[in-house]
Image: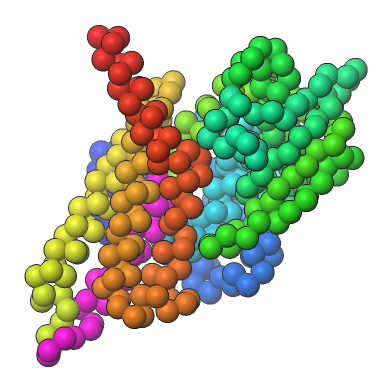
Amino acid sequence: MADKTFLQWPFFEDRHRDLAVELESWAKSNLAHVGHEDTDAACLKLVKDLGSAGFLRHSGNPDGNLDVRSLCLIRETLARHDGLADFSFAMQGLGTGAISLFGTDAQKSEWLPRTRSGSAVSAFALTEPQSGSDVANSTMTATEDGNDYVLNGEKTWISNGGIADLYTLFARTGEAPGAKGLSAFIVTPDLSGFEVVERLETIAPHPLATLRFTDCRVPKANLIGAPGNGFKVAMSVLDIFRSTVAAAALGFARRALDEALQRVTAREIQGAPLFDLQLVQGHIADMAMDVDAAALLIYRAAWTKDSGAPRVTREAAMAKLFATDQAQQVIDKAVQLHGGDGVRSGTAVEKLYREIRALRIYEGASDVQKIIIARQTLGAFQGD
């Protein structure tokens, strides 16, 4: 049974505790036997089911207010039960975050009811073949032409690529060099010149693709925010959702700790439970400490944002770096404690081992988070 005592921390309100109870009950009834053989079909069904249950209402909000604590609680709980369920929820929020925060009333009224209900699938198209974490180095172009922008270039590693109904896409409109010359757009796959050129396979199967745009005309009405503000839009969205990546890692780590506890109390060696070995107790202590430390960093960042902080760049970076790196260690220990069964294909800890690795890369790799934290720390010091 996963630890729930953290819900009594002062970061949370009763509505968060109620949400955690409601989602836990739903997850137990609906996620125990999710099939992953057809990843596309599984994601589409999960989005629909999450929408029907009402949980996707937290993924976007017409007034632009996104409760980060709720987002983190949902991702943590879903990840603990099923990695693909967490992925499906997360992309609905990340894909429409720019619309919630910066979209026009028309854009919000067209898309948010559909993504919140689960009838439309969203995606966030930022990464390019030559620019991953270096967003300012984006080379995809959007050239103004009459009432349209004309897109040319490629995006890659796009989650929900190939199954999404809308893509929040970032391209260079050229108002200024670097970060100041990017803009954000709503792009739909029915547009001429939009092409899915490759589906990407990973160690933990998710729908991922490389997209190509060749003279793809996007109406100016699809521009999100002002021209040249794309970098601000992207960073504002990531500022919110980066903490939720950490929460997903926390969910994986909690599940790994539970699986490890079950193993070491049931498995015997020389007539006594594995847990009686002091080295095993040391592993369990380390795992429990990493889980709680990660939770504190995550919900500090989420509470700070929900309390009105305009940006939580430092807090979110710390949460993501620590939670994802330590979840990797927690899961590795769980695999070790399972012995040969830990690497048996299809076991819970083996699946967790494959799921966690990508979280240390996407939405800002661990090394990038260290740079962010260092620069934020230096800036605070010099500002004193």
Judged left or right of residue 281, residue 146 is right
Q: Residue furthest front?
A: 130
Judged left or right of residue 170, residue 76 is left
Assign the C terminus to one quadrant of the image.
Answer: top left
Judged left or right of residue 259, residue 164 is right
**Position of 247 relative to 262 (above/below):** above
- Whether residue 254 appears in magenta in the rendering, the answer is yes
Res. 82 visible in picture: yes
The answer to which image quadrant residue 329 occupies is bottom left
Magenta highlight: main SS = helix
- Whether residue 12 appears in magenta in the rendering, the answer is no
Assign the N terminus to one quadrant of the image.
Answer: bottom left
Of residues 335 and 166, the one drawn nearer to the viewer in this rendering: 335
Q: Position of residue 5 (x, y in %)?
A: 24, 53
Of residues 90 and 159, the one drawn nearer to the viewer in this rendering: 159
Range of residues picked out in magenta: 246-271
State the residue at coordinates (39%, 22%): 309
**Position of 252 relative to 64 (above/below):** below
Q: Position of residue 374 (x, y in %)?
A: 33, 26
Q: Residue furthest bottom?
A: 271
Of residues 147 and 63, the one drawn nearer to the viewer in this rendering: 147
State the residue at coordinates (43%, 57%): 356
**Position of 223 relative to 46 (above/below):** above
State the residue at coordinates (27%, 77%): 263
* Colour scheme of the rendered structure: rainbow
Res. 66 visible in picture: no
The answer to which image quadrant residue 254 occupies is bottom left
**Position of 221 relative to 94 (above/below):** above
Q: Position of residue 14 (x, y in %)?
A: 34, 44
State the residue at coordinates (73%, 54%): 198
Q: Position of residue 80 (x, y in %)?
A: 41, 61
The answer to which image quadrant residue 228 occupies is top right
